[in-house]
Image (cartoon, rainbow, N blue to C red):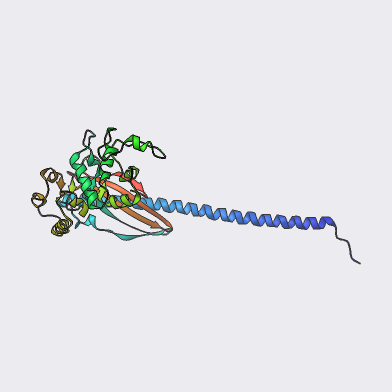
Amino acid sequence: MRTARSPQAGVALITALLVMALLGILGLTLSWDNGLDARRTYTMLFHDEGSQAALGAENWVGSLLRDDAVDTTTDHLGEIWAQELPVLPIESDTIQGAIQGGVEDLQGRFNVNNLVDGNGEVDQDALAQFERLLVALGLDPRFAGIAADWIDSDQNPGFPNGAEDPIYTGMIPPYRSADQRLTSITELMALEGMDKATYDTLAPHIAALPGNTGINVNTATAAVLQSLDEGLSPQDIESMIADREESGFADFQNYFQTLVPAEVLDSLEETSSFFQLKVVVQIDTVRITYYSVLYREPSSGATTPILRSFGTI
């Protein structure tokens, strides 16, 4: 004889199944969240480890530059600091990774802040040199005047090339010109008409250094050397770079005396005080790119970081 099943039994079964499903979902959610939390924690720890490794590399490079100032009286591309840093492993009981990088002499580039003098007025010689640098790179020379207007202390647009607040406040979104010296060359991306392709071409040849600085001819790029005088051709620069080799010019003043005007010759140097360190640290899936601008005191060789940034110059 078949016994009738109670309706409450069916409800209880469904309720039990729902409870089991909810418990399963809850357990899966907790496990997922726990995994994410653990991954976030490891990422933060790896980022901190990478940052400390980058700072350690900065300290080591500072020691190299200080020792170099003691041992030699010139700076050139054949010195230890100018070589690519080898890939060094980072190993411990908890992490595996590597660190690599390199140092560049920022005085081998054109200092954009040279466009203005101590009174905030445009330096016409520096402006002309920047125009020649742009031409040597195949870029529009009008960016020299626009950059000078961005940095100078007044609101009078240069003629025929210039741009001040009336131009920038009409953009979307609107902004104003800096009217002060740059702290980073990335600020040039804000110039009227500047695009990424132009900036990427120009960036390896320029720097934004405090005050007015000279150019180290032993480390200067080919385009910067060509910008020294309008009479210098690409063929002249090839011969010039071949003559300086890795150890630099034997007597740069005598070498350049007949090639550039006297006012340009006075701005040329064979030593440097500003360097840029780039360090790339990889730990697990965490990758850190660290930039540091180092100032080396000419007399003592003491090296001090004056600008640090992660991810961008």
In depth, the one of 33 and 170 nearer the eye is 170
Residue 69, x across and y down, in percent = 18, 49
Tally of numbered tags: 0
Q: Residue furthest right?
A: 1
Q: Is residue 14 left or right of residue 97?
A: right
Residue 263 appears at what percent x and percent y? 12, 42
Residue sitting at 47 percent across and 54 percent down?
42
Vertical relation: 261 (above or below) 28: above
Judge by depth and name the residue closer to the eye, 224 or 284: 224
Residue 226 is at least partly visible in this image: yes
Tell whether 235 sits left or right of 283: left
Q: Residue furthest front?
A: 160
Q: Quadrant of the N terminus?
A: bottom right
Vertical placement of residue 91 versus 225, above or below: below
Query: Is 243 placed left or right of 193 in the picture?
Result: left
Report x, y in % for residue 12: 78, 56
Q: Is residue 304 visible?
A: no
Where is residue 225 shown, x and y percent of the image?
18, 52
